Image (tube, coloured by chain):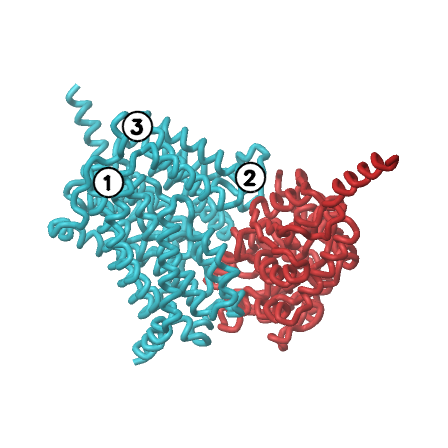
Chain colours: A cyan, B red
Amino acid sequence: MDILANLALGFQTALGLSNLAYCLLGVFLGTAIGVLPGLGPVATIAMLLPVTIGLPPESALIMLAGIYYGAQYGGSTTAILVNLPGESSSVVTALDGYQMARQGKAGTALATAALGSFFAGTVATVLLALFAPPLADLALKFGPAEYFSLMVLGLVASIVLAQGSLLHALALIVLGLLLGLIGTDVNSGTARYTFDLPQLSDGIGFVIVAMGMFGMAEIIANLENEATRTTMVKSVTGLLPSRADLKRIVAPVLRGTALGSLLGILPGGGAMLASFAAYSMEKKVSRHPEEFGKGAIQGVAAPEAANNAGAQTSFIPMLTLGIPSNPVMALMIGAMIIQGIQPGPSVMTDQPALFWGVIVSMWVGNLFLLVLNLPLIGLWVRMIAVPYHQLYPAILVFCAIGVFSLNNSVFDIFLMAGFGVLGYVFRKLDCEPAPMLLGFILGPMMEENLRRALLISKGDPMVFASRPISAVMLVMALALLVTVLAPAVRRKREEAFQE
Amino acid sequence: MKNLPFLTIAAVAAMLSAPALAEYPDKALTMIVPFPPGGASDTTARLIAPKLTEAVGQPVVIENRPGANGSIGAAQIAQAKPDGYSLLVASIGVYAINPVLYKGLKYDPKKNFDLLTVAVRTPNALVATPNLPVNTVAELIAHLKKNPEKVTFASSGTGSSDHLTAALFWQQTGTTGLHVPYKGGGPAITDLIGGHAEVSFQNLGVVTGHIRAGKLKLLAVTSDKRIPAFPETPTMAEAGVPGVEVYSWQAVATPAGLPKEVKAKLESGLTGALAAPEVKGRFEEAGFEVVGTGSAKFSQFLDAELGRWKSVVEAGNITPDQ
């Protein structure tokens, strides 16, 4: 069989001593930068790009790929421990993961994240090896109309993220949409809400908003309270998940893996949607949806599995078509070009050792990550037992460095501080930032694709209904909307009758 | 000891002026790339930097300052001291297109920059999605005339060099098309391959792999002569469309007002780096052609480019409201 020969070639490449070392180096670096809030894989890979010129192409890509998925592991660590999602995909991990940490179950949450990620990574790697070319063709079926409908579905699903008032959630989603509109309009080139500040002309970076709204707001709120100001967590119980915990996470991990693998293939931010979608789905199917947001272990397992699966399958369009699905993939393509490799469908046939070596290395890397992360959990957990007056200045400094490293811009640090204050105000008003962040991410993509679809269809809105994939997603969105709104409407009516 | 005060003054004066007289450069040089890492300007800077480091004997640090189509980084260079320690590596967009497109720009490439050299260039390829029923430029023109303002032209953004190349093509052939802007070349190419958009002008190096794999149809190249990699493909002029000879280029500049010897040192360092065989080879592998013709030629070339794109923008009425 072809696939066996290919995999054998892949193992030969990936298990070479130097490639193993680069893989280990990559995942180690990735974990480290993922753990440091704000420092993301984009900045790190960009800095290492010149170094890779001197490496053989396989080693270069293996190391860079390791940084990327290593950062996915590391990113969930800070999301869980200190409520700092450094990556868009770890925003939902923070929701329940941080609550678990506050209850002293940080170790369990971290181990759940690591195990879920490992399982998802393994499955996604197998998928990648078996079905990369047909899956890539599926991704190409997604045009502007399909993306728009996918975003609508995502936005409706985000209402499920809300834990409190539905009205608050809606208001915050809209606020997120508006914030997302800041910057240069893709279609006309017009600057919107930029107040003539060139720093705003490309919009506001996700990391800036996320770290302000989550991390900095959390710090301000913690300082307010005598108990949380001294140490965050009194006692840490259970480093590893119990047998009962494991039983509870099996199904969520499986569902998250499936969802993440599928969405990750889409080059327009699919991987980003995966963790949100997985969380929403778990909350929907759970018999105890009220536990979500208060430390439900399923709320950590499913999105973590989904985001790692998505991270792996997002390599499919990059490796098979030469299409970058996110900024990290764009950098990987840059690395290939510097190496003199022409990204595109020919990579698979012209450079089989590179293609299969990178795929196999992903599985090896995931194994490294598990081995690296499980023993580290004890260490990480001890970190949050550090007196808070020592911990929070360090977090703030790393946030500032991280945000600065994105664009080398001081303006962005001030912006983050502004969002920190806003996040604190929202907290006082009982408004959760997660729906706002989703609106912020989805809004601009939705607008871009809506207008592009209508531009291509010459203004005919039927394009969304006449294209089958798009129609199916719109129907799903409608169905979901009905199930979300129906109980709320019923409750309102019951209240009305009681009066 | 009558001369003592004078000597002291002379000594102090010598000490004060010492930094200026000290051999340039005595500290690291910074190359500002006004785009994110991984793009064409960034690749250019990173391939030149090691050789320039050897030539000037000081490290060359690359700093990415992305934002506003490269205007933020370019404006930073426009305001920097002309001491030879700040360099700009940027694209046709920063030097020749932003100035004719945007009114409130914080830099003027003619006034604020000392132009050192054009580094590299790459032609655009006129590519179409495989299902489009045209195989030559003539057939495309006929198709466009039959379907005015209907055929979709994907670009990497409003006011990008590929958008303006399409506008120039329409103006030269008397045709029209439907401009569909994307956020960068990547998504535009994705939609071309998927058949969601139909035609585009993209940098040849970026689409070579897709053309070879039959995912995109190559109709013509915008270079002055045929490309060795595609000997069968005509240039625009050969295909009957003169005046659409377009290159995407990358060039190096500094703040205006460099001391003469500093400028000479940088210019020779850069042209030397570009001429080095290993650098040249790397650029060719990445799909770039090395230019490296120095300051005077760059200045003439920039005038020509500014004039040409200004008329394209005016004729096409391309006005992003600023």
Outermost residue on the right side: it is B2
Chain letter for mark 1: A
Callouts 1 and 3 in the same chain: yes
Going by the image, does B169 lie left or right of A9?
right
Q: Earlier in the sequence, mark 1 or mark 3?
A: 1
In the picture of the structure, the residue carrying the numbered disc 2 is A199
Quadrant of res B60 = bottom right
Task: Indicate which disc residue A101 carries.
Answer: 1
Q: Residues within 10 Å of mark 3 (few under 14, many from 20)?
A: few
Q: Residue at x 22, y 54 (%)?
A: A253
Of badges 2 and 1, nearer the viewer stands: 1
Quadrant (top left/top right/bottom left/bottom right) for the C terminus of chain A: top left
Contact (CB < 8 A) between labels 2 and 1? no
Name the residue nearer the viewer: B80 or A261.
B80
* Residue located 50% across and 38% down the image: A412
Q: Say what secondary structure mark 1 lies in.
A: helix
Residue at numbered disc 3: A430
Q: CA–CA distance between discs 2 and 1?
A: 37 Å
Q: Relative to A244, is B151 above or below?
A: below
- Answer with left or right where residue A487 lies relative to residue B235: left
